Amino acid sequence: MLGRLRSAQGLADPAPLYDELRSLGDVVPAPWGGYFVTGFQTCSQVLRSRTWLVPDFAWQERQPDPARWQAPATREMTGTLSRLNPPVHTCQRRSLGNLFDRATLTALTPHVERHVAGLLDGLERRLRADGTADLVTEVSERLPLLTVGGWLGIPVADHRHVLQFTHNQVHAQELLPRKSELEQSARATVQLRAYFTDLVRQRRRAPGDDPVSHWIRTWDAMEPDRAAVDEIVYRLTMFITIASLETTATLLSSMVWHLLRRPARWDWLRENLQHVADAVEETLRYDPPVRLNSRVAAEDTELAGVPIRKDEMVHVMYGAANHDPRRNPDPHVFDILRRGIHLTFGGGAHYCLGAALGRLEARTLLTRMLQRFPALRAVAPPEYAPRMVFHRLTSLRVTA
């Protein structure tokens, strides 16, 4: 069943596999130990309860096979915000403040609008010249990099390299990465560290009115060790960049695909633009960019009637949870007017930092695409990277 989730069919339509997993229970033993969590309510409980922690360095060192966690890329990500537990996580999260609050989003909105307009100009030129274009490479991968990169002050000339480093690095965050994938991730990790360490060094030398400079000032006031501060700011900057690129790019492409696969949906939404936000939310529910995430038990506990020992791992299946018919009736139907509930951005202390920004980018892009490309159609179904965690679209060819 797990192999089928990574197959071409499972990547394109995992819904039947979600049903099979859920039929085995809300908590299903994994072949290598640990458990898959499939039900909406149970997944929500794991994400929001303090009984469940992320697998941090301390947890890794307690494992009987600690060598499994020694891959350079794995160690690097374990030091980022997504793999920190209280009180360290609490301190770093508070240092960021409300990262994308209303004021920040208001300030970013004209920039997002400008980026979208420029990318759609390029898409239109490509369509006129060639008749078809790849939405992923022309638009979806570039918009979040322009947005977050511009906000952080990453030079446009560096975008292509940062994007490639990111695609290669996230192999280490997969459920069962191959040795070759871990080697590729290790190389990308070295490149990301060199790039973002230098970026932080430049901001320390010449601080400005940007988030990286602000984080340096904030942490300098709390921590006298400047090397330690630079390491913290490096990890924050690197993590926010790569997390936003992989997830938002997939959301943008999936959103367009699920509308175009039934052209009547595209046509209807073009006449009912007030429901663009609903279409974005249904995409997030129906096809989450991240399909699963992992937690470990902080103590001996019980989950949906299943005893779980301290330090045992569970894998929260976002896709299966979002398709739980007990929470979302007829879950395998893509319904723009559903107003359903989803766990795509996680929950609790680790709720996605960039949720509001991702929604802003998706709403802006979809609105402008509907207005500019009323006859847009998909040439073929999308292509996917063979992954179980990050559900990345690698290509979506369209015509107008």
Image (spheres, grey):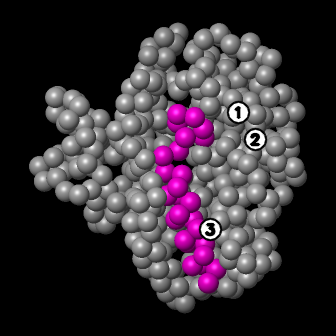
Horizontal side, residue 394 vs residue 285: left or right: left
Q: Name which of mark 3 and mark 1 comes first in the sequence.
A: 1
Q: Is residue 227 above or below residue 249?
A: above
Badge 3 local density, few (<14 within 10 Å), some, or many (20+)?
Answer: many
Please tell me which residue is depicted at 76% across the width and 57% down the height of the picture: 339
Kindly identify the residue that appears in the image at 48 percent across and 46 percent down: 353
Q: Nearer the viewer, residue 332 or 218?
A: 218
Left or right, 229 with reference to 243: left
Label 3 is placed on what type of residue?
Leu
Q: Which residues are magenta?
A: 346-371
- Disc 1 residue type (three-letter): Cys
Which quadrant would residue 281 be assigned to in this image? bottom right
Label whose residue precedes the other's in the sequence (1 or 2) = 1
Picture coordinates of residue 185, whole percent (x, y): 43, 40
Q: Is residue 142 above or below residue 82?
A: below
Residue at numbered disc 1: 43
Numbered disc 3: secondary structure: loop
Disc 3 designates what residue? 396
Q: Is residue 316 left or right of residue 151?
A: right
**What residue is disc 2 on?**
320
Determine the residue located farthest toward the left in the rendered image.
205
> What residue is drawn where x is 49% and y is 51%?
354
Residue 222 numbered mark, or none: none
Q: Amino acid at mark 2?
A: Ala
Query: Can the viewer see residue 151 in this picture?
Result: yes
Location of residue 147 (image quadrant): bottom left
